[in-house]
Amino acid sequence: MAKAANVDKVKRLRGWVQNYDWGRCGAEAQVARLLALNSGAEVKPDRPYAEFWMGTHDSGPSFLADGYGEDQNVGLKEWIRKNPNVLGHKVLEKWGPDLPFLFKVLSVAKALSIQAHPDKELAKELLKLKPNLYKDGNHKPEMALAITEFRALCGFITLEELKGVLVDIPEIVELVGNASAKQVLDISKQDGAEKVKYALRSVFTQLMSASKEMATKSIAKLKSRLHVESQLRCLTEKEQLVLHLEKQYPGDIGVISAFFFNYVKLNPGEALYLGANEPHAYLSGECIECMATSDNVVRAGLTPKHRDIQTLCSMLTYKQGYPDILKGFPLSPYITRYLPPFEEFEVDCCILPKGASTVFPAIPGPSIFLVFLGKGTFRIGSREDIVTEGDVLFAPSNTEITITTSSELQLYRAGVNSRFFHNAL
C-alpha cells in the first residue's frame, strides 16, 4: 500500500509542447491531441506539434496542474526540490533532487536531423565551450517506443554493406575521393576492428565535410540517375528513402549519407534504444520516448539548424551492425516493460481491457504516468481519482497504484530503471 505521507504527493501535471518544424500539423498529431486534453490549449491546424514533454528539463518543464495555495503554478522541478524525499533515497543519493529521466511523445512528419548525443564527459566540455548551443552537462541515452509504424536511421551498416554502397553509388565515391573509398574496399574483417573503424570514420568524415556546392551537384546526379533506373528496375527501399529525403531537404549532405545507416522500421509496440555517441535520425511516425534528462544534440545533416560536423564525426563510436529491437516483456497480463541498458529510465505500457484492473506495485523511485487513451480510476491508499486520456501524473517512490477501467485504458509509465535498484542493494 502507499505510505500515507505519499498519498497527497501524487500530482497531476501540465506537459510542455515543442513546435519544431518536423512535427505533424494540427489535430493529426498525437502531441496536439494530448496537449488539448492535458491543458485545454487550442490546436492550430497549420502549426507543427512535434514533442510533448513530461519532466523537469529547463527547456520544457512540467508544472503542477492541480496546485492551490503554495503549489499553484509551481514547476515540478521546484516542487521536487522542496520535497526531495518523493524521489526515494537511492535516486536522491545518485542524482540529487531532480528527476533523472525525461518522458516525451513525438509526432514526426518529416525527418529529424542526423544527430548524436554526447557522453557525460563530452557534454561537460561542450557546455563550457559552446553554452549557447549545448545547454547542459548531461549525457542523453534514449529509447523510442513505437505507437504507430515508426521509421528511423540508426547506427552504421556492416562493412560488407558499406562496400556494396561504395560500388553501387558512384556519387558517394565522387564526394569522398577514390583513396578513401579504396581504403574501405580493400579492408577485411581480418584486419581487425580498429582498422575497420578508422576506415569508416575517414570515409564518413570526408562525406559529411563535402562543400555545399559539391553535395548539391552529387545529389542532383544521384536523383537523375535513380529516376532513369526506376524505369528499368524497382529501386531499393534505401534508394526510395533517399529520394524522399531529398524532397524534404534538397541538396543536404544528410540525404546521401543515409546510405551509410541502418534503415529501421519499428512496428507498434517495438522499441529502439540509443547510447551516447550513436548516430541516428528519426524519419516518420509517432512514438513514446524516454531519455536521461538532457537536451544535448550534435547535428550534421537533414536540418536547417546549426551543424557541428567536426564534433559529430569525432565523437561517434563507429559501431557497425543492426541495432537491438526491444519487444518488451510481460510484467503482468496487462503490463509490458521495456528495459534499456541505461540506469536512468525504463518504460511500461499498460493496455487494460474493459472491466479489468491491474496494480503498479510500490517501487523505490518516482514515476510519471501518461494516460494515452480511455478513462479509468487510480486508487492510491484510500484515495480514488478518475483519470482520462491526456492526464499526466507524478507518483512518488513507494506508492502502490491500483488501476481499474470500465472502458479500455492505454497508459505509459516512465520510471528509473529497475536494475538500478537491484544493483544499488
Image (tube, rainbow, N blue to C red):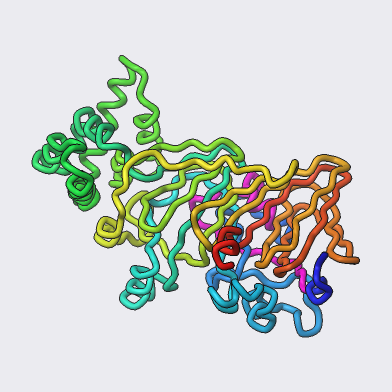
Who's the residue at 83% across and 58% down the image? 378
Who's the residue at 49% across and 36% down the image? 265
Residue nearest the viewer, comparing 162 with 196:
196
Residue nearest the viewer, comparing 38 with 388:
388
Residue 169 drawn at (x, y percent):
23, 31
| Number of residue marks | 0
Q: Is residue 249 left or right of residue 45?
A: left
Placement of 323 over or under 142, stated as above or below: above
When asked about the image quadrant of residue 399, the answer is bottom right
The residue at the far right in this view is 382
Q: Is residue 60 left or right of residue 378?
A: left
Q: Is residue 321 left or right of residue 166?
A: right
Residue 341 drawn at (x, y percent):
49, 54
Q: Is residue 139 visible?
A: yes
| Quarter of the image that includes the N terminus | bottom right
Residue 102 magenta: no
| Quarter of the image that includes the C terminus | bottom right
The residue range painted magenta reads: 9-35
Q: Is residue 220 visible?
A: no
Who's the residue at 59% across and 48% down the image? 338
Residue nearest the viewer, comparing 345 with 232:
345
When asked about the image quadrant of residue 227, the answer is top left
Residue 121 drawn at (x, y percent):
35, 70
The residue at the far front in this view is 425
The residue at the far left in this view is 179
Residue 393 drawn at (x, y percent):
73, 63
Placement of 285 over or under 55, stated as above or below: above
Placement of 397 over or under 108, stated as above or below: below
